Image (spheres, grey):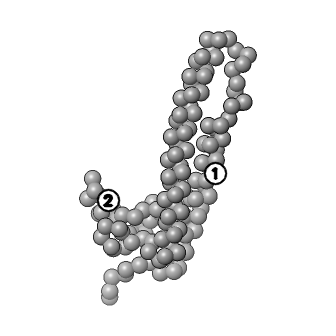
Amino acid sequence: MAEKTRYNDEELAEFKQIILDKLEKAKKDYEILKSAITQSESNDTQDTSPTFKVLEEGASTLSKEESGKLAQRQQKFIQHLQAALVRIENKTYGICRETGKLISKERLRAVPHATLSIDAKQRQK
């Protein structure tokens, strides 16, 4: 029997649902991070002493920086998931960009935006 070169429509539909679920959660998480960055009114330090205000503002700045980095990572993750949806529509989803062989279903279920098989990924290291 010939080796499969691509996933069939039923398999692609399964992966599409996995990606859509992850995409919905990722977008919600991104919105939470974004609102944490722009939130300026909650936990305000207006009525505390100057010493505490300085300490809290420092922690707030650090928290905003961390939230900003997390938001950037989340946005990148969303872009990878959206690119995976495009590959599903093009019927090129699940094909390793290095070897041209199918990426295992187990890997795609765990990392649905993967573009490299485990072998190709390990060779990169």
Label located before the other in sequence (2 or 1): 1
Is residue 80 visible in the rendered structure shown here?
Answer: yes
Judge by depth and name the residue closer to the eye, 1 or 96: 96
Q: Dividing the image into 4 quarters, which one contains the N terminus? A: bottom left
Give residue 106's quadrant in the image: bottom left
Q: Is residue 28 left or right of residue 109?
A: right
Residue marked by disc 1 = 28
Residue at the outermost bottom position:
1
**Image x and y of residue 8, in percent:** 47, 81
Q: Residue at x 32, y 59 (%)?
A: 121
**Image x and y of residue 89, in percent:** 52, 75
Q: Is residue 7 above or below residue 57?
A: below
Q: Which mark is residue 98?
A: none
Residue marked by disc 2 = 121
Badge 1 amino acid = Lys
Q: Mark 2: which secondary structure?
A: helix
Q: Residue at x 54, y 39 (%)?
A: 68
Q: Mark 1: which secondary structure?
A: helix
**Image x and y of residue 6, in percent:** 41, 78
